[in-house]
Amino acid sequence: MKRSGIGKARLLQGNEACVRGALYAGVEFFAGYPITPSTEVAEAMARELPRNGGKFIQMEDEIASIAAVIGASNAGCKAMTATSGPGYSLMQENIGYAYMTETPCVIINVQRGGPSTGLPTKIAQSDTMQARWGTHGDYTAIAVAPSTVKECFEETVRAFNLSERFRTPVTVLSDEVLGHMREMMVIPEKGELEVTERHKPDVPHEWYKHFEISPSFVSPMASFGEGYRYNVTGLTHDEDGFPTANPIEIKNKMEKLRFKIERFADEIHKIRMDMMDDAHFTVVSYGSVSRAARQAVTMARERRIKVGAIQLRTIWPFPDMKLREMFAGVRKVIVAELNMGQLVNEIKRVAPRHTEVFSLARYDGEVMTPHQILEKIREVIK
Amino acid sequence: MMEKIAHGSDVTHHYLRPKKKFPNVWCAGCGNGIVMGALIRSIDRLDLDKDNVAVVSGIGCSSRMPVYLDFNTLHTTHGRALAFATGVKIAKPNLTVIVITGDGDALAIGGNHFIHTCRRNINITTILIDNRIYGMTGGQFAPTTPGGSFATTAPYGNYEKQFDVVKLAIGAGASYVARGTVYHVQQLEKLIEAGIKKKGFSVVDVVSNCHTYYGRFNKEGDAVEMLSWMKKHAMPIEAVRKIPPEKMKGKFVTGLIHEHDATEFTHEYQMMVDRLAQKEAEK
């Protein structure tokens, strides 16, 4: 990697940090379509990939972008795209194709306000649920979320690792403020962060099953041009990748899509806790809201309120058990988010009976402020 | 004679997947099988390594073809085959990438990808099997259905106009545009072969028959009758150039209709990469 500024502190934009993270993880292919507020990702990729041995293409729309990404991944590349709400909606059918065909790929979604064209230049966390349920059918999604520029880098690396490890698309849920803000960060040295490579088959060609149902759940993946000559289809298929109508094969496939991820959920979950040791109250959030939550909690502590902050760095699969444990001593939970209340329903679902859940929803295109959260804390502890 | 037939069958079987794939999903008499045979024979003549051929398709009757073929095969979503294929080709330019698509797949839902892939002139060969109707969903009109024709969604006759695939591809920048039919199989083989050889985006529009829907709704008869219609109405481009346009009424042109040399996408990209590397080295 050239000109990466490894080891030196540098001022980076969140969107640029995603690109740096992708290069660190070994991205080889990017296809995208311009959309505010994610465009800087495509621009930086257009600059960096040709001089780092990678491939860049600007496609005719978002549907084509994710299609090209999936094609390139099947040809052996670590591949990604970047978009925002409307583009993410357009991509959904092909993201479903990636789930079904177990094709690794990364989608950076720099969230903005919706529905429809909504608020292109304003912040929102409107795709929290779209990242889980965006495409039709049953599947288990993975979505990770940074709250700082440094975390934009780290979560993009992690998204690639999870994607290659589990042969599945992974969404990075960034947002407009995070994407455009600048912070100092030191690019990690090579080897400092783990980088996962795709698990390749080691069997003779005629023994290879592209969608093998194995004890380890995730099957090794050969690429086009390596002599395995497998079939890939979005139709429900057998282990060899051929369309099936056999109820047992259909059931096995569906369960594989779920359990290959859910069985290993502990490896995927990542939660940051601040001042939670003795907390009776807690603020749960993700993304740039977590920055305000941390400050609000510090301010509340100065007022001797026993409140802590929980930041979800993995949104999907949802960390049910972990949160349930964390809520053991917690009486009241505030879920702060930039939408009309998407995450809050998940928290209500997992909260133990003794824990009351309150929603702090902001959906006017503005950032969540620490004061707003502090005010809510003071309101609910009364 | 018998020997030759046996040999032909060996060639075909060498490129087909033996287990579980047959019988195929197509109606008896469908043109898709004829195109598949022609594609196999042209690949065989070009002596391509099976490991280095990728066949990509969308959704529809014709798009089921890759499942039967013993190559690297990608059966994608409706209309998006060319976008997927573009990703495959850019990622691994040494692969021969062939797209199998239908008229609905390529020109309606996939129309945008079709014109942009023509524009990029990326080295992909597209075989567009044009049966003038949506077969898999049961006979709805397509962007290629002639005005006045009947379809389940045009029960009183089609009041829309049809695309001219050849003009569309030429206008959008494809460097090789040909048309064949499932009746003129030897010509079709040659057109596909030359299309694969061409460095750039190639479109082979194949006039095919859907007797099950189009033929039945429009009283064009069974598969044999529809094939003889092709025989009677196809005009080789060489002949067309010699006759006055009014004699073309009711006929359609076949053969290599357009070819030009233009820089190819993956080649251009590599040139840029090399230029950047050279600049870097000079620093």
Image: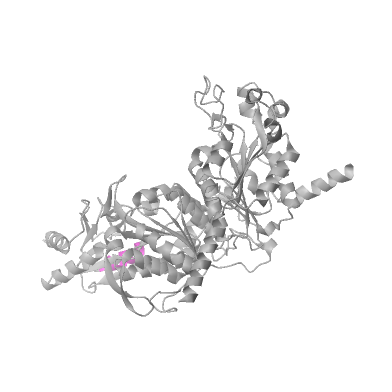
Percent coordinates x, y for residue B14 in the rendering: 76, 52
> Majority secondary structure of the magenta segment?
helix
Q: Residue at x 65, y 50 (%)?
A: B198
Q: Residue at x 46, y 65 (%)?
A: A49
Percent coordinates x, y for residue B5 in the rendering: 84, 43
Tell me: A59 left or right of A207: left
Percent coordinates x, y for residue B31 in the rendering: 68, 36
Q: Is residue A74 magenta?
A: no
Colouring mode (rainbow / by chain / secondary structure / one colour):
one colour
Q: Nearer the viewer, residue A310 or B82?
A: B82
Q: Nearer the viewer, residue A348 or B70?
A: B70
Percent coordinates x, y for residue B177 in the rendering: 62, 42
In the image, is residue A219 above or below residue A254?
A: below
What range is drawn magenta here? A317-328
Q: Residue most toward the top? A: B156
Tell me: B107 left or right of A305: right
Tell me: B205 left or right of A292: right
In the image, is residue B132 above or below residue B79?
A: above
Tell me: B1 left or right of A287: right
* Residue A116: quadrant of the picture: top left
* Residue B267: quadrant of the picture: bottom right
Quick check: can you spot residue A265? no
